[in-house]
Amino acid sequence: EHHGERPPLLLGDLRRERARADGEPMNSRVTYGTDNEPNGVVYTFADQPGSRDLLAEFRDGGKPLEPLVDRAARSEDVEPPFSVYVIEPEEPFLVVYIVLEPDGLLDETVADTYL
């Protein structure tokens, strides 16, 4: 049961399309649980002409995830640890989903859906 939460790619669809239309390489959105409390942050990276392999860069540390995690902690006034998912769908974009409550319902939903 998802309790009104949507999987991250559905949440990211509008932002991804807007980023692609505006030519922006990255967009972000805070997600909320049914209690209207922030439960995560979705970062959507649109493919750009001549772009790098972001998945490989995140995987090998060439592009660190820490700045995104730090930004999520600051903007939502919460403390790590967080769960961080890097999702590469078959679309021309990459999603980084930072779940603010490890082992919570959203974390379980994302893990069950994308791992």
Image (cartoon, rainbow, N blue to C red):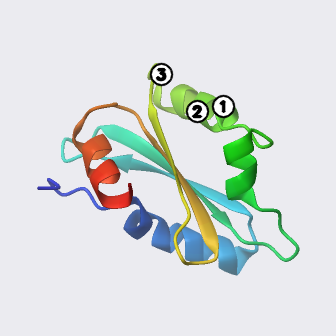
**Image: 69 above or below 8:** above
Which quadrant is home to the C terminus? bottom left
> Which residue is at the far right?
50
Which residue carries the number 1 mark? 66
Residues at circles 2 and 3 in contact by the CB criterion of under 8 Å: yes
In the image, is 44 to the left or to the right of 107? right
**Image: 19 above or below 1:** below
Residues at circles 1 and 2 in contact by the CB criterion of under 8 Å: yes
Q: Secondary structure at mark 1?
A: helix
**Of the residues under marks 3 and 1, which one precedes in the sequence?**
1
In the image, is 34 to the left or to the right of 97? left
**Of the residues under marks 2 and 3, which one precedes in the sequence?**
2
Q: Which mark identifies residue 80?
A: 3
Q: Mark 1 packing: few (<14 Cα in 10 Å), some, or many (20+)?
A: few
Between marks 1 and 2, how big is the CA–CA gap? 5 Å
Which residue carries the number 2 mark? 69
Q: Amino acid at mark 3?
A: Pro
- Residue 2 position, x and y percent, is 17, 55
Residues at circles 3 and 1 in contact by the CB criterion of under 8 Å: no
